[in-house]
Amino acid sequence: MPAEPLLGLEDVAIAFDGLQAVQGVSFDVAEGRLCALIGPNGAGKTTLFALMSGFLVPERGRIRFAGHDITGRAPHLNARAGMTRTFQIVQPFAAQTVRENIAVGAHLREPRRAAALAAAEGVAAQVGLAAQLDKPAADLTVAGRKRLELARALATKPRLLLLDEVLAGLNPQEIADMIPVVRAIASGGVTVLMIEHVMQAVMSLAEHVWVLAQGRLIAAGAPASITRDARVIEAYLGHGAAARLQGIAA
Amino acid sequence: MRDLVTIAAFAIAVAVLSSVLRSGVWTTFLMMALYAALLAQAWNLLGGYGGQFSFGHALFFGTGAYVQVLAQTQAGLNAWIALACAVASAAVVGTGVGALSFRYGLRGSYFALVTLAFAEVFRILAVTVGFTGGGVGVMLPLRESAANLQFASRQGAILVVLGFVVAGLLVTAWLRRSRFGAWLQAVRDNEDAARALGVDPLRVKLGAITLSAGFMGAGGAFYVQVFQYLDPNIAFGPATSVESLVAAIVGGIGTLWGPVLGALVLHALAEFTRNLFGDAPGLNMVIYGVVLILIVLFVPRGLSGVGRDVRAAWRPGRAG
């Protein structure tokens, strides 16, 4: 019998004013994996993250984490249990320094101030922010803020890290710099589920991909097979696109 | 550590000053400036570090003041025991108001309005119910002795209020280097990000409003001990609420010394204009208002930020 997955979604659904944002999504994330959730804009990916982490409560379905039913549990309790999310639109504590920002995350496991600040330095080194520890968060570049978002979440010592487009808005060089950082986190034993639009990153990082379109899962599998899936191509490029692409290839 | 040294130096300097000053005008000035600093510090704990702008801090001030006087006149308690009751009751009222407003996610102007409404409700209650003495107010019998927390000389009163101000400084310094303080400032700066990192915003805000209300209650208790008279308007009227927040904002919210500096400057300004334009009643308030506008306009981060800005301008190499 296989071990219970770290995270399990069962028929999860939510609607906003009649718009079915997520409709009956079910999947499992096994511990130790690096997986990705992709899909066109408005597919419901970020909403799904908000449901998992407790910022939204599903209207239907159950969410299990580490063997417990966590449906509708508050975000701070989920973070304490080991599931931490980042935000697509970065949310720094702008008035505070990078070190103080990361220390807020570290305080979850470390009550003492000195120890939390020391832990923040370690995490900053891990994500490449060591040189900017004393800068106010407001002074960071977009790439720096994305790293800070990642660092703060990492400082909570999560078992499962939900990364919401940590590569969005970065230039190709910054993306290339960031990919090994994410890979190192995953190989350090943290289970990672990432929402990502940058296919270069998804292809090189993810072991498994789920594709969400209009609130439903339309495909799942290894990255290479996903990109050949006719339903996925149509979801991104429109009806009939898959057939035309095959025509071009032939 | 540096904070502790400066706080100790401040305490010693004020204590020495209080024993050196002979003029009644200056000892009264020092006492009232420290008292204003205490109210501003109390407001700063919640408003400056928690980002929850209260417009009704008189609620906690009045609770402390009424408990202080009634515990002595009605229950016959010693003034020092009454003081403990006053601080505790104000803190409990703070927790209660916090639980009611934060549980339902009230923020910004909505929170400000709710605190204002609570203060007004208490003011009206204090007028209506019997044991507060109603609109006539209550007197605290004059019994000058340290055991009764009443002092024949201003120096005793100065030392008492200095004790509260130093306690306020120590609590603020602790906020700046503790987990609770880090969580409180995280909630202030971005509540959703804080929640994602495992911070329980309700618990943190409740802690802040309880602390803040407790210090405000101490301010109310001190007021009663010095002036020996209290009525619903003094206790729960908006003047105290405004005084506490203006001094904190002028001095610099979310800073250690801002409230003390703001209270000192505003108090000096008020006294100065009153002496200068005493013959033309009302003109002093006009001048006071104009200076206030200028401060808010040109030093929006508060007076305590001026030094930092000047230093940053002198050392451009360190910026960025």
Image (spheres, coloured by chain):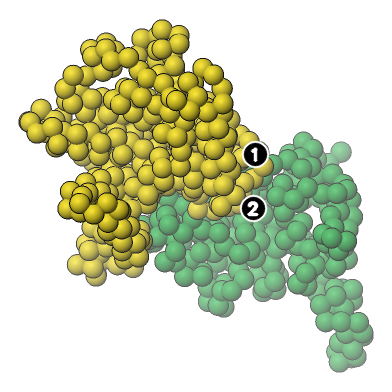
Q: Secondary structure at mark 2?
A: strand
**Residue A42 position in % (x across, y down):** 78, 69
Residue on which the image places disc 1: B103
Which quarter of the picture shows residue A66?
Answer: top right
Q: Which labelled disc corresponds to residue A128? A: none
**Residue B254 position in % (x across, y down):** 39, 48
Give the chain coloured yellow.
Answer: B
Q: Is residue B28 above or below residue A215?
A: above
**Residue B36 position in % (x across, y down):** 31, 39
Separation of disc 1 and disc 2 at Cα?
A: 23 Å
Task: Determine whether, in the image, residue B300 is placed left or right of residue A228.
Answer: left
Give the chain coloured green.
Answer: A
Q: Amino acid at mark 2?
A: Arg
Identity of the residue drawn at 61% across and 40% down? B101
Nearest the eye: A2 or B102: B102
Residues under numbered marks 1 and 2 in contact, where contact means CB atoms less than 8 Å apart: no
Q: Which labelled disc corresponds to residue A85? A: 2
Q: Is residue A2 above or below residue A20?
A: above
